[in-house]
Amino acid sequence: MSTFKFAVEPNIKTSLDHTFRPMALAFTNYLNHVKQTDDYEEVVIGIRRSDEEVSVFRTIVFHEDHVDAIHNNLYIERIIKTLLWLKGGYQILFQGPERLGRFVQKAFSFNQLRHFDVSFMERVYEKPFEVILLPKDAFIEEKENAKDIGRHLEGCRIGFDAGGSDRKVSAVMDGKTVFSEEVIWHPKTQSDPNYHIEGIKDSLKRAASHLPRVDAIGVSSAGVYVDNQAMVASLFIKIPDDLYQKHIKNIYIDIAKEMGNIPLEVANDGDVTALAGAMSLNANEVLGIAMGTSEAAGFVNDKGFITGWLNELAFVPLDISDDASTDEWSGDVGCGSTYFSQDAVIRLAPSAGIELDDSLSPAEKLKRVQKLAESGHEKALEIFKTIGIYLGYTLAYYHMYYHMKHVLILGRVTSGVGGELILDYAKHVLNEEFNALSETIHIQLPGEASRRVGQSIAAASLTKI
C-alpha cells in the first residue's frame, strides 16, 4: 500500500514482495494526471555542486488549489532526493509554487525529514547546505563538467577495488592482466584505521610483486572521492571522525606516496563499473550498476567521460510503498541499498522460506542462497527473479535522469545463475511495461571472471602516466 494516490501495482509481480510499488509507474501516472489539468505549474530544480557545476531538472505539478496538490510534496521530495544522490550538491535552487518551495526548504534542513541527506552533502562538499527559492522569471543555467579519465593501459599498472566484503587487485602490463586476486575482508566492522591501511597495502604489494615496476595505481572504492580524498565512505563507517580525518581521508594518497610517489587516481566504484562496461562494450552512454555489499553505480556519458556526479544510487528511492524496505544507515525507505545488494537477498530469504544462520556474515549468507539457486531450489531462484523485477522497473526510473543506452550489471550478487535470472527478468519487465525503452536500453552481464574482478582491471586504467 501507499499513501501516494498515484502509486500503481506492477503488472509483473513477485510472490516475495506484494507491497512493491515502482517509482517509475507512480510518477508516470502522477504526471499523466497533472497534464490533464488546465492550470498545472512548472517546476525547475537546480542542484549546485560547485561554482562551475549545476544540474537542472524540469517537471510539472498540480496547481496549488487543485484537490490533488497534496501529493506534490511527496513527488517533489522524492525527485530532489534522487537528484541529490544521483548528481550530488550542497545547494538546491527551486523555482515553482511558493508553498511547495517552502515545503522543500523545511524538508531539506537539519532536524527535519531529510537531515541525513543534508549532513551527508555538507560533509562531501564541505559547505553549508541551503535551499534557495527563486522567482518565476529567474533563469537557472545548467553547467556540467565531465571528466576524461580511464582507458590508459600502457606501462605497468595496479588496479585496486575496495568492496565491503572483499578487496580485489589486478596487475596489468601494457593492457594484459598478469595477476588478479580477491581477498575477503570486513572493513565495515573495523574501527582501527590500521586494519584498512594494512589490508590495502597488502593487496597493492602483492600485485606489485608481479610487475617489474609500478607506473601507476588506479583505485575503485566504495564512497565519495574528491581529488583522491575519501570524503565519505561506508567502508570506514566504524572509524571515529578524528581518526578518519587523520588516517582515512588521504588513505590512498598516503599509501601511493609511501610506495614511491606513484601516480594515483581514485574513483567511486560505480564510475569504474561504468568505465569497465564502456571498455568491454567499446561504447558510451553506459550505466554501470554493481550489486555487492550495497548498490554502487556510475555513468559514462555520450563522449565517453565520467560525469563527476555522485551516482550514489544506494540512496535513490525506487519503491514508493509505505511498507518499502528501510535503509539502516539513512533511515529512508524504498532505496536501492536494500533492493540491489546482498542485503536484498538476505531480506527476501525469509519470504522465500529460507533460514540463514545469524552467525554467518552477509557475504556468507549470500553464498548460501546462491548455492541453493545453483541446485535449482525454486524459492532461492525466486529471490533473484524478484531482484530482476525490481531492476526492470527501476531502470525506467533511472532513465528519467541518465538517458543511458547500455546497462552493465556487476557484483557478487550477479554471480552464477542468479545473475542470469536478474538479467532475464529485468528485460522481461522492460519488454512488457516499457516497450519503447526496451528497444533503446541494452542490459548486459559481463563474463563471470570479469564480473568479479573487472572493476580492478578497469581501475588500473584510470591514471594517466
Image (spheres, grey):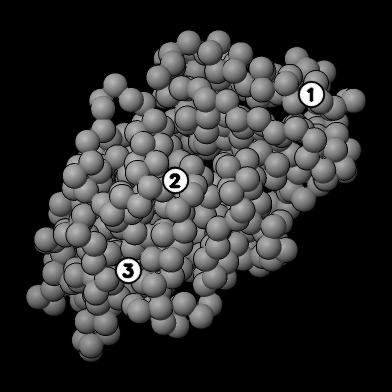
Classed neighbour count for the residue bearing mark 3: other residues with Cα under 10 Å, few (<14), some (14–19), many (≥20) = many
Q: Nearer the viewer, residue 369 or 411?
A: 369
- Please indicate whether residue 230 sits to the left or right of residue 105 in the image: right
Amino acid type of the residue tagged 1 in the rendering: Ala
Q: Position of residue 134 (x, y in %)?
A: 38, 62
Above or below, 16 against 392 in this view is above
Residue 204: which quarter of the image?
A: top right
Q: Residue at 26% x, 82% y: name it.
A: 32
- Do tag 1 and tag 2 residues touch (Cβ < 8 Å)? no
Q: Position of residue 262 (x, y in %)?
A: 81, 26
Q: Residue at 20% x, 71% y: name it.
A: 8
In terms of sequence position, does the residue under pointer 2 or pointer 3 come before the other?
Answer: 3
Cα–Cα span, label 1 and label 2: 29 Å
In terms of sequence position, does the residue under pointer 1 or pointer 2 come before the other?
Answer: 1
- Mark nearest the camera among 3 and 1 is 1
What residue did someone put label 1 on? 208
Above or below, 175 against 219 in this view is below
Classed neighbour count for the residue bearing mark 2: other residues with Cα under 10 Å, few (<14), some (14–19), many (≥20) = many
Q: Residue at 81% x, 25% y: name it.
A: 210
What residue did someone put label 3 on? 24
Q: Position of residue 81 (x, y in %)?
A: 35, 52
Q: Nearer the viewer, residue 327 or 390?
A: 390
* Badge 1 element: helix
Q: Residue at 82% x, 43% y: name it.
A: 176
Cα–Cα span, label 2 and label 3: 23 Å
Amino acid type of the residue tagged 2 in the rendering: Val
Q: Which mark is residue 413?
A: 2
- Do tag 3 and tag 1 residues touch (Cβ < 8 Å)? no
Classed neighbour count for the residue bearing mark 1: other residues with Cα under 10 Å, few (<14), some (14–19), many (≥20) = many
